[in-house]
Amino acid sequence: MADTTIKIDEEVRNHLRTVADERGISVRALAERALLDLPTEADRAERAARGLAYVRAHLRPDLTDDDVTSAEQWFDAIVAGTVGEIR
């Protein structure tokens, strides 16, 4: 096992300690779990492909790649605040 030092703010370190204590694990174990839960781009692509396969198999067999692209663009526009009503 390799040791790595990561410099973080004191507030973040204290938060890690609190969460680790509440869960009854070490800060190291908490950090390892949190970091291993971060998906890679390959993980995200695989998850998206499985999701699309499920939708096509069970909900919308006629879903096209153009439909997916259009939905992605629509979502990006919502996130950017260029679509929809601002309340």
Image (cartoon, grey):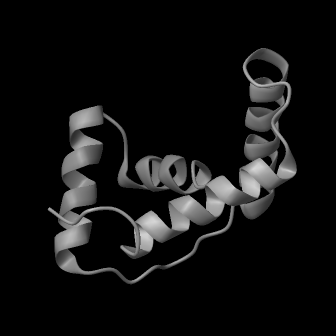
Question: Residue 28 at what x, y percent from top left?
Answer: 45, 55
Question: Residue 76 at what x, y percent from top left?
Answer: 53, 67
Taking 3 as reference, is 21 left or right? left
Question: Residue 31 at what x, y percent from top left?
Answer: 45, 56
User: Residue 54 versus residue 45: which sits nearer the camera?
Assistant: 54
Taking 78 as reference, is 3 left or right? right
Question: Residue 68 at what x, y percent from top left?
Answer: 74, 50
User: Residue 46 versus residue 68: which sits nearer the camera?
Assistant: 68
Task: Write the residue at 16% across / 72% down.
Answer: 11
Residue 24 visible, this angle: yes
Taking 61 as reference, is 40 left or right? left
User: Residue 43 versus residue 7: which sits nearer the camera?
Assistant: 43
Taking 2 as reference, is 86 left or right? left
Residue 43 visible, this angle: no
- Residue 53 picture quarter: top right
Task: Write the residue at 77% across / 15% down.
Answer: 58
User: Residue 51 versus residue 59: which sits nearer the camera?
Assistant: 59
- Residue 24 picture quarter: top left
Task: Give the quarter of the figure containing the C terminus.
Answer: bottom left
State the count of labels. Answer: 0
Task: Give the quarter of the figure containing the N terminus.
Answer: bottom right
Q: Residue 62, relative to residue 83: is it above or below? A: above
Q: Residue furthest top?
A: 58
Task: Write the residue at 26% across / 62% down.
Answer: 85
Task: Write the residue at 36% across / 73% down.
Answer: 81
